[in-house]
Amino acid sequence: MSNTATQLIHSIPVDPLTGAIAVPIYQTSTFVQEAPGVNKGYDYARSGNPTRAALEEIIAKLENGSTGAAFGSGLAAIDAVIKLLKSGDEILAVDDIYGGAFRLFTHIYEKFGITVNYVDATKAENVFNAVTSKTKLIWIETPTNPTLKISDIQAIAKIAKASQCLLCVDNTFASPALQQPLSLGADIVIHSATKYLGGHSDLIAGLVVTKEKELGEKIKFIQNASGAILSPFDSWLVIRGIETLNLRVKQHSFNAQIVATFLETHPDVEKVYYPGLKSHPNHLTAAKQAKGFGGVVSFTLKNDTLKAGTAFVTATRYFKLAESLGGVKSLLCQPALMTHKSIPAEKRKAAGVADSLIRLSVGLEEADDLINDLKQAFLINNLNINPLTKSLADQAGI
Ligand SMILES: Cc1ncc(COP(=O)(O)O)c(C=O)c1O
């Protein structure tokens, strides 16, 4: 199934009990039973809640999978997938991985005897060469965070099948509105639903979707056994976000293309990372496997220092300095000092996350206003105005 706006909107059920057009919030911890074990499908809300169940069914449909499971954060969703493994197993992960996933793998799971190897997955042959007999899980993000590298999901899925290991794709940046990894051969998709699925910077949530029911049952078991579930209210917020997902992601992508094109011609910019640009090394793979290129754009400055990056990210007005992405308001951040701080500098730089790299989450404002905001930030940088006293720039009418 590809996600047309109609399919997406009507994947959200009308309440069978009352006809409510919006999914009701079942704010309850337990469910009354007629006799021990005789109930209406729910007994205790960690094991199952109708609002969360509605979200889990919706995301399973949108990702073309069999089973969805909702967690209290994207990291809790990643954690649940890693719990499928056992001591002695290996994970082969994309090198430009989200910093939080790197921290979880290294500081929690290596302690339990799970080894993680990293590879530049933009070339499928690198993945093929790095798989060992102990590899039980291949972990990719595509696009990656924050250098927007693209991996060929279909090619890597074939390698995973041939090597009898699972392929999990972190689909946070693309969202199912643009890309459906399970349809391309992946076994598991995870989301930080905090981002595009929620879409309004007002919640933290994570989702796992499996292609096969049997694997889905294992994830559901882990969800109940470990207990990192999403609350009914946050489940409802994610459902509400999903209602407008297609519309929002289309506009995010449209604005991001304009911003990336502007940055590519700016004299202070060294490099722009956006899969929608023809200059992006994996542009064709991105165009083949996704319906659009998303709302995240990264770039580096010619003056590639932590200081110059910090000066820029504190000089914008519409782009707010904050971690996260995928919301209505534009955000920006300096991964070297924020999201990727937990990755050692050498490893971080080797994966392309330069000191001055700036990641933009392009929001839903007018594209012209965003361009003007970036222009004035470059200007402030060049004039060497202390960004913390931006009022000077205001007085100067810049
Ligand atoms: C690609 C990606 N995956 C997972 C996560 C973790 O999600 P959460 O912050 O919801 O735990 C993030 C968070 O930034 C992310 O960017």
Image (tube, rainbow, N blue to C red):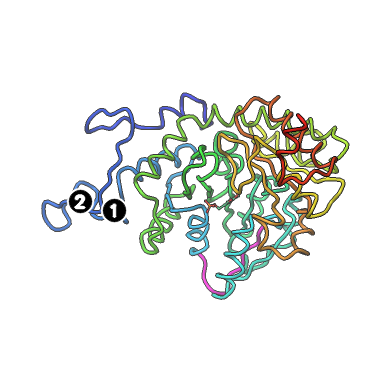
Label 2 lies in ligand 1 vicinity (Cβ under 8 Å): no
- x, y (%) of residue 104? 57, 64
What amino acid is found at the position of numbered circle 1 in the picture? Ala
Q: Residue at x 48, y 50 (%)?
A: 206
Which element type, helix, strand or loop, lies under badge 2? Answer: loop
Q: Which quadrant of the figure has residue 96?
A: bottom right
Q: Are marks 2 and 1 in contact (CB under 8 Å)?
A: yes
Crowd tier of the residue under label 1, counting other residues whose Cα lies within 10 Å: few below 14, some 14–19, many 20 or above: some
Numbered mark located on residue 150 in the image: none
Q: Residue at x 48, y 37 (%)?
A: 62
Crowd tier of the residue under label 2, counting other residues whose Cα lies within 10 Å: few below 14, some 14–19, many 20 or above: some
Name the quarter where the C terminus is drawn.
Answer: top right
What amino acid is found at the position of numbered circle 2 in the picture? Phe
Q: Residue at x 41, y 27 (%)?
A: 10
Q: Is residue 340 left or right of residue 24?
A: right
Q: Residue furthest left?
A: 35
Foreground pick, 104 / 380: 380
**Magenta part of the chain:** 85-93
The mark nearer the N terminus, 2 or 1, is 2
Foreground pick, 311 / 91: 311
Residue that label 1 marks: 45
Q: Residue at x 44, y 40 (%)?
A: 238
- x, y (%) of residue 271? 83, 43
Foreground pick, 383 / 209: 383
Can residue 148 be seen here? Answer: no
Numbered mark located on residue 31 in the image: 2
Queried whether the magenta region covers residue 280, the answer comes back as no
Foreground pick, 359 / 172: 359
- x, y (%) of residue 258? 73, 28
- Across the whole image, how many numbered discs are drawn on residues? 2
- x, y (%) of residue 214? 42, 54
Query: What is the C-alpha distance between the residues marked 2 and 1?
Result: 8 Å
